[in-house]
Image: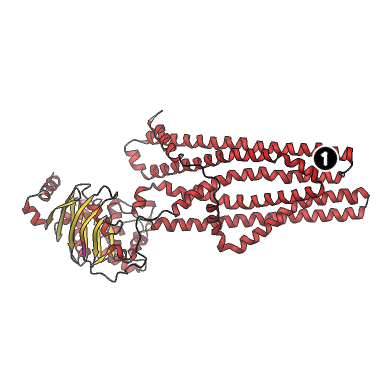
Amino acid sequence: MNTNARSITMINRRERSDKYRPLDMALFRRLFSYTKPYALKRNTLFAIVVIRSIQLPLMAAVLGWIIDGPITRGDMQTTIYGTCGFAALALFTQFTLHFRTRYSLELGTLVIHDLRRDLFKHVQRLTMGYHDRTKIGRIISRFTSDCEALRQGVQSVLFVSMVQIGQMIVAGMIMAWRDWQLFAALLVMWPIIWLIVNFFRKRLSEAYREVQESFSRITATLAESVGGVRVTQGFVRQDVNASLFADLAADHGQVNMTAVRAAGKFVPLLNLNNQVFIGLALVVGGWQVLNQGSVQVGDLIAFFMLVPLFFSPVQQVGLQYQTAMAAMAGAERVFALLDTKPDWQDPPKPIELPPIEGRVELRHVTFGYDPAKPVLHDINFVAEPGQTIALVGSTGSGKSSIINLISKFYLPTSGDVLIDGHDITQVSSPSLHHQMGIVLQQNFLFTGTVMDNIRLGKPDAPNLEVIEAARQLDCLDLIDMMPDSFFTEVGEQGAGISLGQRQLICFTRAMLANPRILILDEATSSVDTITEARIQKALSVLLKGRTSFVVAHRLSTIRHADCVLVLDRGRIIERGTHEELLMHRGTYANLYRQFVMATEA
């Protein structure tokens, strides 16, 4: 067994270790609650289901009455009337079938629409900790395969099963009324049905849960591979990734085959019982007609028509049970995501920040993404309004962690982060973020135009204001060089736009937003030296009057910072201006010397 296969097997064991859960009525009720906004359509559908349950057994009873009555007596006129009534009833069954099918499909679509809407809102509100821990493919699978399984559950399982069960009850009542002895003989087979259903229930439930989990792994791997296709091709990992995906696909095929094999045994066994029931009815009913004369031929014909209506629902419900298992597996996963709590939440009555001056203070802050493993230790500093604070240090020293805390993407494990004297744990996150601007190393551009992406920082800004923001940054000519200038279409994740252009678009976005606190996290790393020189002057305009935090490996971008914080292993080991730190001849001076040597080389 290769490494990929062993890894997949280990994952399967972990994911399949959960205890078997039968149909969960709590999950069903929660899903059904999504039909409340559509109560009129839902209640109409219930009424149609009741009517539909009665129609087919009634048609069999009417047919038996016509044969035993007017046909046996040779009453042509009544036979014609009865036949017309039967035809009208048959036509009415098609009418109700149309609306039962239509309304159930519409209701399923509406429910899944609302469920996906709630999922999206919830995912957008989950904290960064969740998104850092969770593969994007797993989230996507909740919106795709899991929601589709739920759609089938709403559209098919509930209402089809209700029709089948209602039909079975009505057919049983008619059969018991016509000949209770024959009906009692048929009921002898019911324990066999119960044993079959109970035997396969657990196997089908586990099989369909494994199918959903396996599909989730495929989705996650596919999203990761497509997103990293440049790295894949750059490092010639096509065959390695293809092998991994092939192993995942093989595992998915295996668990699908397990589910199909179980279903392939379950359905024929139910169908066999149906045929046995008909044979039993033929033997017992035929003996009554021929020897006792207690049963009329019309009654026996009606009985033969009612037997499938009484026992075929068992087979149909068995088929629906498979869909129900897939739907429940999807419901478990969807509602588990909806029930996922953010790592932290604003207090019930948070402080709404007024327009801030931009004073930022970290007071004895300790933080760890895993609280047991701190990455920041006792961090203390103050940024006065309008100051520029530079964060310098090797990779993993804690620079981005400080930025995450100031941005309120995470909360400190201990200590306080204060904005204008307000503890950020007590303030409204939107009221803080509306007054902050962030330009990251890997800037994300949404599908749309360049103008749309810049206006993200200020949605109501007129075009002239957007153009003026670009002019202030001295990048108007670079945007005009694009095929359609500000109205150039941006592909998915910024496709079609160079890395440098993406950075400039995000700088212009920050300029337009006019934040009081500005964060530049490796923001010039993708800008070439010539372009960087052009925006240095514009950056001084952008930073002026704002409290700014600059994280940069290019130390040339932080020479004019009011304070440079040098971090090492989560601690501030040096602080001061660029000149002061050079005179100190410590870690910063060594870093700057290396930077100068690398630049000259």
Q: Quadrant of residue 122?
A: bottom left
* Residue pictured at 89% horizontal, 40% vertical: 292
User: Could you tell whether 271 is left or right of 115 in the image?
Assistant: right
Of all residues, the one furthest to the top in this rendering is: 1
- Give the image location of residue 296, x and y in percent: 87, 45
Q: Circle 1 sits on which residue?
A: 285
Q: Nearer the viewer, residue 548 or 295?
A: 295
Q: Residues within 10 Å of mark 1 (few under 14, many from 20)?
A: many
The stretch of residues the image draws in magenta is 357-361
* Residue pictured at 63% horizontal, 38% vertical: 196
Of all residues, the one furthest to the right in this rendering is: 74
User: Could you tell whether 257 is left or right of 523 in the image?
Assistant: right
Q: Nearer the viewer, residue 405 or 165?
A: 165
Q: Which amino acid type corresponds to the residue marked 1 in the rendered image?
A: Gly
**In the picture shown, does residue 15 fall above or below 162?**
above
Q: Main secondary structure of the magenta part?
A: loop
What secondary structure is found at the residue carrying circle 1? helix
Q: Nearer the viewer, residue 13 or 506?
A: 13
Is residue 242 in view from this perspective? no
Q: Nearer the viewer, residue 179 or 39?
A: 179
